[in-house]
Image (cartoon, rainbow, N blue to C red):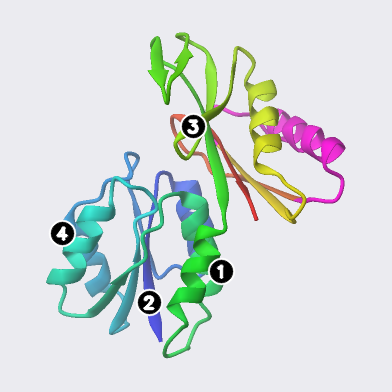
Amino acid sequence: GYGSVAVASSVGLAEIMGNLGASYVLTAPTMSPSVGQFIEAAGAIPFESVVLLPNSANGLLAATTAADLSKKSVRVLPSKSIPEGIAVLVSLVPGIEDYDWDEVTAVMQSVRSCAVARAMRKTTLHRTRIKKGAYFAEAGDKVVAVGPDRLEVSTRAAAALVDEHSELLTVYYGESVSDTEAGALRNNVAARFPGVEIDIYSGGQPHIDFIIAVQ
């Protein structure tokens, strides 16, 4: 079957990926492993066929280069976020010799996600002005919520992702977020969208307060 190498920004997220079947997880706070790290990871696992999941745009070039240089049969799935990579891991059943990769890619791309963080300085992101110290939620190439209150911004961000077809909302909260605040976000979303299942995990990631994903 296939082994998998995934990238995580924290030990907590790495543990989650390992529990979901990742053969090897590279923990890199900047989500930018080197070509050598990808090659070493692919070589360290007992599979001749390997899937690389960079889980951000930062690591995509290194993963692609590593696939070309590796002595193994290596495929890169261009996951652009932690939730996309996790969706792939859930799709990879151990022991299967080959997959419908178009189907796996479609599952990956069906995930909608955003990241909530605090601006360390005054900035403009995707044509949206953000004050220093404000919280903002970035989803793809747009900012879906901005404000001084992290819980309020995160609640608005979750609402921006949910539509009539949504079944599952997953939240990974960072090292600066308490269990109480994460629970409050869950309650806010549950009250607004009672038909959506909600899972919350402590990811412990730095810099990103909440990673929110919807499927």
Labelled pair 4, 3 in contact (Cβ < 8 Å): no
Q: Name the mark on residue 142.
A: 3
Q: Distance between the residues labelled 4 and 3?
A: 33 Å
Q: Distance between the residues labelled 4 and 1?
A: 26 Å
The spot of residue 175 in percent (x, y) is: 52, 32
Residue that numbered label 2 is attached to: 3
Identify the amino acid type marked 2. Answer: Gly
Q: In this view, does 6 lie to the left or right of 134?
A: left
Toward the left, the furthest residue is 69
Q: Please tell me whether residue 13 belongs to the stretch shown in magenta.
A: no
Residue 9 falls in image quadrant = top left
Residue that numbered label 4 is attached to: 36
Of labels 2 and 3, earlier in sequence is 2
Q: How far apart are marks 2 and 1 (CA)?
A: 13 Å
Q: Can residue 69 be seen in this view?
A: yes
- Secondary element under disc 3, as helix, strand or loop, is strand
- Binning the other alpha carbons within 10 Å of mark 1 as few (below 14), some (14 to 19) or many (20 upward) gives some
Residue at (54% x, 39% y) in the render: 114
Residue that numbered label 1 is attached to: 90
Nearer to us of marks 1 and 3 is 3
